[in-house]
Amino acid sequence: MTSTFCVITLLCSLMASDTLQKTTIMAVQGQGIASPLASPSAVSSKVIVQGIITAIQQRPLGKQISTGLYLQDKQGDGNPLTSDAVFVVTQTSGLNIGDSVTVSGVVTEQNGLTQITADSIIDTLTKNQHNAHIRPVILKTIASDDDFAVTLERHEGMLVTVTPTSKLHVARSFSYDRLTRRNNMALSHGQISYHPNQYHWPSSQASNIQRQSNLDNLLIVDSFTQAKGGDVPWYSDFAKRPNNHIRIGDSIDGLTGVIGFSNGQYRLTVTQPAGIDTFIHQSPRTTQPQLATSDIRVATFNVLNYFNSSFGGTSNPSGQNRGAKSPAEFEMQATKIVNAIVALDADIIGLMEIENNGYGQQSALQDLVTRLNATLPPSKHYNFGRLNEHNPLGNDAITNQVIYRPSIATLLTMITIPMPQQHAPKIDKESGDNYMRDALTPTFKINDSGAQLTVSINHFKSKGSTCWEDVALQHYQDDDRQGSCEHLRVSGAFHLGQQLSKIDGHKLIIGDLNSYAKEDPLLVLTHRHNVDSKYTIEAARDTYINKTPLHGKLGATIHQSFGYINTVAQQHPRAFGYSYQNVVGTLDYILASPSLKPHIVDAIEWNINSPESPLLEYSTKYTADMKKFNDPYRSSDHDPVIIALRF
């Protein structure tokens, strides 16, 4: 170890050089977003600082997090506008948390993080003492903070703790982060983050403001090492028992770590273990949906690729298996889905993402209904509608289906409404051929009242694939944040509205419409209140119903809206049922014809899936030997939606 005399001698010789200046960490950080000492000239930005090691990054993590340490001034300067700590890029061998060290190096701004790159030529890290103590400060805003990003910048590099005073909530439970390609968690300041198009029409000023607010209020909760499958590195008891869970909306009490910045996001890298008391459930789990008494309940449920063909079931037209990969996984999936549907206690249920392998004894539909009825009394048994005796519906691996209770409703008719197909010219890697699943549309008589109810079950085109307009018109850009293929979804919404207008009586449009509440397809099916009169909604070009053209070579501008009621939004405006990359919103709907308005008792998203970590799903692909529970929670990635009606 270098002696105190050698340290003093070294520092004196360094300070004699006009290329180095002894300063404080606070002066390095300054009061702005970037260090006032950072410069393209390495000569002008060489410094010597002293501080206490609060955390150590022993190995690089991803492309933007280097090996190094977090160094904090023991006293600070009492100025809340300057951070008291800084990240130092250096080798960490022989160093420990609590060491007091002297560092010389170059101040830089690297990927948005103020840091000192230690000089590799001289002995830059010299221990002065061990086990010095830095008390974490509570992370909270002050009056001068323009936004939460300013709050985080003021604490960059510092050891902080998150308490209820911090006003942070879980925005994404522990799960895979596509940006950094590892598992972590996200917090949001003030409230959870809603998708910009959930409450504001696409490309509007309000939508853009919402997007920026989401970014400004975001804090990623990370770890010093990449999490192993099924583990939360800083919460060892996570999911070991059913109550050890983290839900979107949870507030935080006692999560401690250092503030960094990488990949365009501020990060809290956790330094102390968390436990069950760290997360305060603002919206606790419920064992069943809470709705008022009604005559009949109708629900929609995306069952997350319920496939049995690999386990003795009939094959589907594509031969693909998108679901469970082993008998054990399938049993876990089936049990979770069955328990969720039993608790849902709905009389008519539209199913999405169930295997398209017909209606026979070895079909996924028959398998699910058999399992359900084995757990239910005869008065609550389910049946399913058939369009044919055994054949699949179309050529896809998955389809829409309906199950219902004959004790409550009688199936009168069942048809499919063929949905638009796009056959446009090939462009780049886009073939121009795009499809959407047909709308399964049964009509029921409610046994007690005799009322008739048509329920159209839909699964609109995915946001994740591309259509012709995404390439030819938008050049792979998504400026309005509607995802891919919104034009084809508009065509589908328009055609569905037209076809349902030919059917008399009460109608529900249910299912996964792959559109947030103020996006174009929903504006077509519901209304355009508060939307700028200059805003246009465009349908896809080269669309056909079977072989009959729907829109011409240039597509069409859609002016019509069909006036359906977004029932959940009307009853519970802040509801959400889907979570994706730090934001929430609604993709699954029960839309009611205006004739049903006096009959709607309640409608809810039952939050058993979207607030929960995907690690709880049946699949073991990324969770190693993590214990799985057969409860309803994270039985799918979409929440079921349910409406209560009284005739």
Image (cartoon, grey):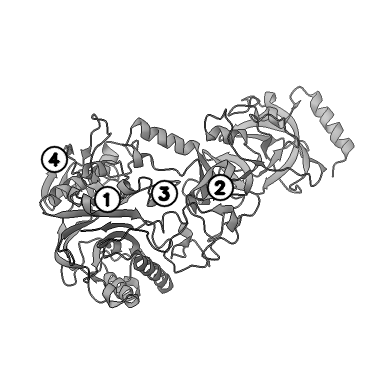
Q: Which part of the image, by quadrant, shows the N terminus?
A: top right
Question: Mark 3 vs mark 1: which is more N-terminal?
Answer: 1
Question: Mark 2 vs mark 4: which is more N-terminal?
Answer: 2
- Residue 221: assigned label: 2
Residue type indicated by callout 3: Tyr
Residue 62 seen: no
Cα–Cα span, label 3 and label 4: 34 Å
Q: Which part of the image, by quadrant, shows the C terminus?
A: bottom left
Residue 247 seen: yes
Q: Residues within 10 Å of mark 4 (few under 14, many from 20)?
A: few
Question: Mark 2 vs mark 3: which is more N-terminal?
Answer: 2
Q: In the shown orientation, is residue 257 left or right of residue 14?
A: left
| Residue topped by disc 3 | 580
| Residue topped by disc 4 | 552
Cα–Cα span, label 1 and label 4: 20 Å
| Residue topped by disc 1 | 461
Q: In the shown orientation, is residue 394 left or right of residue 135?
A: left
Across and down, in percent, residue 568 comes to 31, 50
Residue type indicated by callout 1: Lys
- Residue 402: assigned label: none
CB under 8 Å between discs 2 and 1 = no
Question: Mark 3 vs mark 4: which is more N-terminal?
Answer: 4
Question: Mark 2 vs mark 1: which is more N-terminal?
Answer: 2
Depth check: 424 or 198 in front?
Answer: 198
CB under 8 Å between discs 2 and 4 = no
With respect to residue 166, does 238 lie above or below? Answer: below
